[in-house]
Amino acid sequence: MGNSLWYKNAVFYEVYVRGFKDSSNDGNGDLIGLIEKIDYLQELGIDCLWLLPIYPSPLIDDGYDISDYCSILPDYGTLEDFKALLDAAHKRGMRVITDLVLNHTSDQHPWFQAARVNRNSPYRDFYVWSDTDQKYQDARIIFLDTEKSNWTWDEAAGQYFWHRFYSSQPDLNYDNPAVQNEMLSVIEFWLELGIDGFRVDAVPYLYQREGTNCENLPETHAFLKRIRRFIDDNYSDRVLLCEANQWPQDVRSYFGDGDEFHMGFNFPVMPRIYMALRKGERAPLVDILEQIPDIPPDSQWCTFLRNHDELTLEMVTEEEREWMWQEYGPEPRMRQNLGIRRRLAPLLGNNKRKIELAYSLLFSLPGSPVIYYGDEIGMGDNIWLADRNGLRTPMQWDAGPNAGFSRAIAEKLYAPLVSSQEFGLNQVNVAAQRRDINSLWHRIRNMIRLHKENHVFGWGEFRWQDAGNDAIAAYWRTLSERSLLIINNLSPDSQNIRLRMPEACASEPVDLLSGRKMGKFEEGDLVLKLQPFQFLWLNILKI
Ligand code: GLC
């Protein structure tokens, strides 16, 4: 497609293949099902699909525990199906990236199976072993609810092995050049097939060094740069997206000097969006955006509201975490590890205006937005399912049997549909929202269109505009002559505001979202009345 910076201005959609559409009627979504629905994604305006892991796996961590890096989980289909998906996407000008899990394999991977039974196997050194469980004590435990240590004793191996996630996910040993080379071959395999890049999983943890917290180490950056070099030397238009759930300076380090990742999830901003929405104040956003460092010009943030994991509260203070738990996870069952296992719509009390406001922030703050499947129609969750499965229930396409997800009998579905009064298939489904011009789906579709049409969002500067009112998050997005003034009322009350404009402006700003003229200028001030949770994307002509 010949546009190497396509990701600067793209809208991403995170797909859980098992939950999207079942074409074979076995109760599991699959790649052919996703192809059947690709026109839907195009209609929504999606530029790039990010597929959660699609590889063979014992599924202890829903596919993030890989037992074969170069084929497809049979439930999901075949490599041929995958190629057909790439063709279908590329024909429509859409791209596809997949999850790349570098840090660990499944304990069922043949490398680990060979390693554990034979100290002389070349695969022994693919993993990190120790006679004691006392090394690297400064490394935190991530899956706090289930893991007591980052070391697990393996009887057959007669040693402990190192793992940052579930004990069924042994970490690979990147000090071993053979491991680096194997993973580069995996990367090559998928790029040769034609994928457009990777969302690289759990990157901070690749190396261990005594006396450190074993995160963000220089050796880790060096290997990631090697991947980038390999891609730049051999391919064009591909993207590397970094999952590093870290504080701003540490996330920043993964962009390098424009020679590491093209993109990185903006983990620090995400929980502050929820804080701002709950407090009805812009302060949490102002604080965090001040701390976000500049990134190299060809790089881009990925902004998101929710994803397939718990809403992580690792990158907030303890006090903020307690507050978030109280406000957004009042039931113990809603809490998981250091986070909250709920979807967007339930988190925001299923308040449509508030959900739209959250999307206004998502689409107008700096970065390329990522939408989590189902959140475009405000799907609910099921906190009673194990682990994070309650965020991964079948997509609700229509009000028919199994919500149009599958023709299997309901008992056969990989997970039950959400069936609550509020979020069941009669209340929330794609077909109904497509028919209703005022639905959340149509609002989001409109924002996606505007985000893409207005390059200020992907490329422009960001600058706060003082509104003299703590409830208002107002900011400029500018790119050369073009200026948009985004105004979000975070409060549940209507607000009369008066904005002192930095420069003289022509009269009658137009709201891009509605096409309506909004507010008026009085002595150089913009005077407006905003409804509860109302937001405007104003096109302002400067004189
Ligand atoms: C990432 C994934 C998460 C997974 C973990 C271990 O954080 O988002 O789903 O459990 O890595 O692979």
Image (cartoon, grey):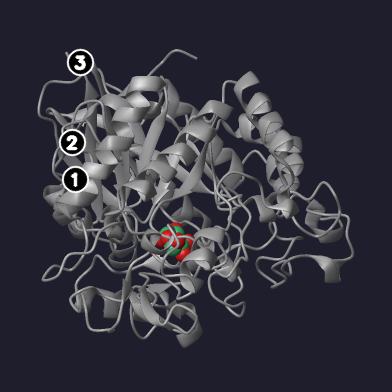
Where 507 sits versus 119, above or below? above
Q: CA distance from mark 2 to mark 3?
A: 19 Å
Tell me the amino acid under the disc marked 2: Ile
What is the x, y in percent for residue 445?
55, 35
Q: CA distance from mark 1 to mark 3?
A: 26 Å
274 left or right of 53 in image: left
- Residue at 43% in and 25% down: 452
Front residue of 532 and 168: 168
Please say whether residue 5 is visible from this viewpoint: no
433 left or right of 8 in image: right
Ligand 1 found in image quarter: bottom left
The residue most toward the front is: 120
Tell me the amino acid under the disc marked 3: Ser
Tell me the amino acid under the disc marked 1: Arg
Where 348 sits versus 461, above or below? below
* Residue for badge 3: 480
371 left or right of 239 in image: right
Front residue of 175 and 357: 175
Element assignment for label 3 = loop
* Residue for badge 2: 295
| N-term-proximal mark, 1 vs 2 | 1
Front residue of 499 and 135: 135
Please say whether residue 135 is visible from this viewpoint: yes
Query: Disc 1, disc 2: CB below 8 Å?
Result: yes
Q: Residues within 10 Å of mark 2 (few under 14, many from 20)?
A: some
- Residue at 63% in and 35% down: 41
* Residue for badge 1: 252
